[in-house]
Amino acid sequence: MQTGAGAVINALKPSRGESIAIFGAGSVGLSAIMAARIAGCATIIAIDKNAGRLGIAAELGATLTINTQVEDALAAIRAATKGRGVHYSVECTGVPAVLRQAVDSLRACGVCASLGVAGHQAEVQLHMNGFLFGKTLRGVTEGNSVPQRFIPQLIDWWRDGTFPFDRLVSYFSLAQLNEAAAACASGLAIKAIVQPPHTG
């Protein structure tokens, strides 16, 4: 939770009314969406290929969802921002092609935070001239957080209802292991917790 939320709150620090695109609507991306709402972003765009996860993203604060199974993400972002692009983007998938999209989605002087973990040999190609317009790509680990301070802040936000991270958690018994896997694959569950039977 602190990875996605911290990337927005601690690293990007958007101003109220600015725009942000979150690439990947898993637990990290959804945490970033909730943090963007707390920060007061006016346009919060969630991009994923899983319709179930996009539905949750809309419930948690995304003002626009883009299903990459049926839409071109960059075209949809440009349409939503009248061709300018977003102030900030967050890449949560670890897929090089998606990181390229996250950078390309930025407007002039925009900033992309890269959070997704890729294989050790993964490389990405970027459009060099795009950086001439002041774009920034930065890596962020664990949300640039000091856990002793930031985790209590997340809990305070949860208590006041603005950071409902419990919405991302689903519980299954050990006998429901297959159901847990299916729920994650469908997007109905984000973080499945399988509980072994209690022993006395």
Image (cartoon, grey):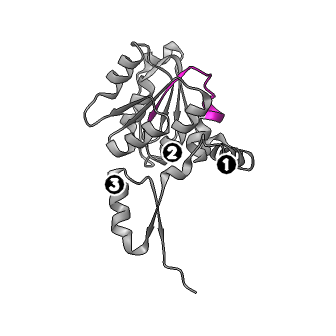
The residue shown at (33%, 54%) is 185
**Is residue 199 in the magenta section?**
no
Which mark sits nearer the N-terminus, 2 or 1? 2
Q: Which mark is residue 185?
A: 3
In the rendered image, the quadrant that contains the C terminus is bottom right
The crowd level at tag 2 (other Cα within 10 Å; few <14, some 14-19, many 20+) is: many
Residue 69 screen position, x and y as percent: 26, 37
Q: Nearer the viewer, residue 156 or 194?
A: 156
User: Label 1 sits on what residue type?
Assistant: Ile
Residue holding disc 2: 28
User: Label 3 sits on what residue type?
Assistant: Ala
Q: Which image quadrant for residue 63?
A: top left
Q: Is residue 91 above or below residue 106?
A: below
Considering every residue shown, the one lying at the far right of the view is 149
Q: Nearer the viewer, mark 1 or mark 3?
A: 1
Residue 141 screen position, x and y as percent: 59, 43
Q: Nearer the viewer, residue 46 or 130?
A: 46
**Is residue 10 in the magenta section?**
yes
Q: What stretch is highlighted in magenta?
A: 9-23
- Asked whether residue 50 appears in the rendered view, the answer is no
Kind of element beneath mark 3: helix
User: Label 2 sits on what residue type?
Assistant: Val
The residue shown at (49%, 79%) is 197
Kind of element beneath mark 2: helix
Q: Which mark is residue 155?
A: 1
In the visual, does 23 lie left or right of 161?
left
The residue shown at (55%, 25%) is 41
Give how far apart the Cα atoms at labels 1 and 3 are: 28 Å
Residue 4 screen position, x and y as percent: 55, 41
The crowd level at tag 3 (other Cα within 10 Å; few <14, some 14-19, many 20+) is: some
The crowd level at tag 1 (other Cα within 10 Å; few <14, some 14-19, many 20+) is: some
Q: Is residue 159 above or below residue 106?
A: below
